[in-house]
Amino acid sequence: MTFKVPSVSDRLAKNQFVTDEEETHIHIDNSICTTQCPEKWCILACPAEVYSIQADGTTIAEAAACLECGTCLQVCTPGGLTWFYPRGGFGVTFMEG
Ligand code: SF4
């Protein structure tokens, strides 16, 4: 009998997200982000690919896909990011631990 280990993307696809349409839990200060962080570490570090750069150079976040791991807070230039857990009833529910 063989057992196939599911890929990370297969496991992530089973998560469920409830989006808070009234209050996002990720706020980017682009006055800091665009002027003090040419590396954009959040884009490299985020496992959910929440962050992206627009044509005008500003960074945006697709907060609905956030896995609430907190990695972006660790790599962001101080002041560039405000992040808090979503309100109760919103955010990610992990379906595989
Ligand atoms: Fe990405 Fe984790 Fe930050 Fe959410 S908390 S935006 S998943 S790095």
Image (cartoon, helix red, strand yellow):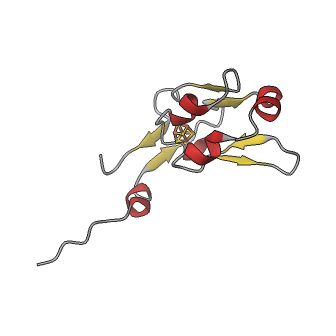
Q: Is residue 43 above or below residue 13?
A: above
Viewer-side residue, 24 vs 38: 38
Viewer-side residue, 47 vs 27: 47
Q: Is residue 54 left or right of residue 2?
A: right
Residue at (58% x, 32% y) in the render: 75
Viewer-side residue, 92 vs 77: 77
Q: Is residue 33 above or below residue 41?
A: above
Q: Is residue 92 left or right of residue 32?
A: left
In the rendered picture of this protein, how many numbered marks are placed on residues? 0
Ligand 1 falls in which quarter?
top right
State the image coordinates of residue 68 (x, y, percent, origin top left). 48, 36
Q: Is residue 16 above or below residue 73?
A: below
Q: Residue furthest front?
A: 39
Q: Residue furthest bottom?
A: 1
State the image coordinates of residue 11 (x, y, percent, origin top left). 37, 58
Viewer-side residue, 40 vs 28: 40
Q: Is residue 53 above or below residue 89?
A: below
Residue at (69% x, 21% y) in the render: 79
Q: Residue furthest top?
A: 79
